[in-house]
Amino acid sequence: MKKGLALLVLLVTLLGTAAAFGEDEEPRWAGVDETVVEKFARDLGREPRDSLIDTDQGDLLLFFFTLAGATGGFIMGYYWHKVFVAGKQETPPRG
């Protein structure tokens, strides 16, 4: 048990160190937007433009994910009983 925990701590430390020292390099692979979508857009005569809502600034993207998670959690909590409890037949206790 202790060997597994020590190995896990060592692995996390090594990955964290590698990530910290690798930030100065440019990413090797471009995203799908740059490689596929922009290529087809240029082939069809459309140049890329900025988004209507710029989510790359600050924590706006994090805010949207939090808002969506809270909304989904509220909806699931509201319908929890109907989805998981109501309509199930009660099984008699085994004796």
Image (cartoon, helix red, strand yellow):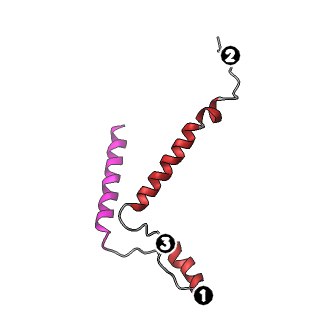
Q: Quadrant of the N terminus?
A: top left
Q: Nearer the viewer, residue 14 or 39?
A: 39
Task: Find disc 2 in the rendering and name its residue.
Answer: 92
Q: Secondary structure at mark 1?
A: helix
Q: x, y (%) of residue 73?
A: 52, 43
Q: Nearer the viewer, mark 3 or mark 2?
A: 3
Q: Nearer the viewer, residue 42 or 15?
A: 42
What is the three-letter code of the residue carrying label 2? Pro
Q: CA distance from mark 3 to mark 2?
A: 58 Å
Task: Find disc 1 in the rendering and name its residue.
Answer: 43
- Note whether 12 is above or below 81 in the view shown: below
Q: Quadrant of the C terminus?
A: top right
Lower sequence index among marks 2 and 1? 1
Q: x, y (%) of residue 79?
A: 60, 37
Lower sequence index among marks 1 and 3? 1
Q: Secondary structure at mark 2?
A: loop
What is the three-letter code of the residue carrying label 3? Leu
What is the three-letter code of the residue carrying label 1? Asp
- Note whether 10 is above or below 59 in the view shown: above
Residue at the spot 64% in from the left edge and 36% down from the top edge: 83
Lower sequence index among marks 3 and 2? 3
Where, by quadrant of the figure, is residue 89 drawn? top right
Task: Find disc 3 in the rendering and name its residue.
Answer: 52
Q: CA distance from mark 2 to mark 1?
A: 67 Å
**Bounds of the magenta segment:** 1-24
Residue at the spot 48% in from the left edge and 47% down from the top edge: 70
- In the visual, does 71 lie left or right of 9? right
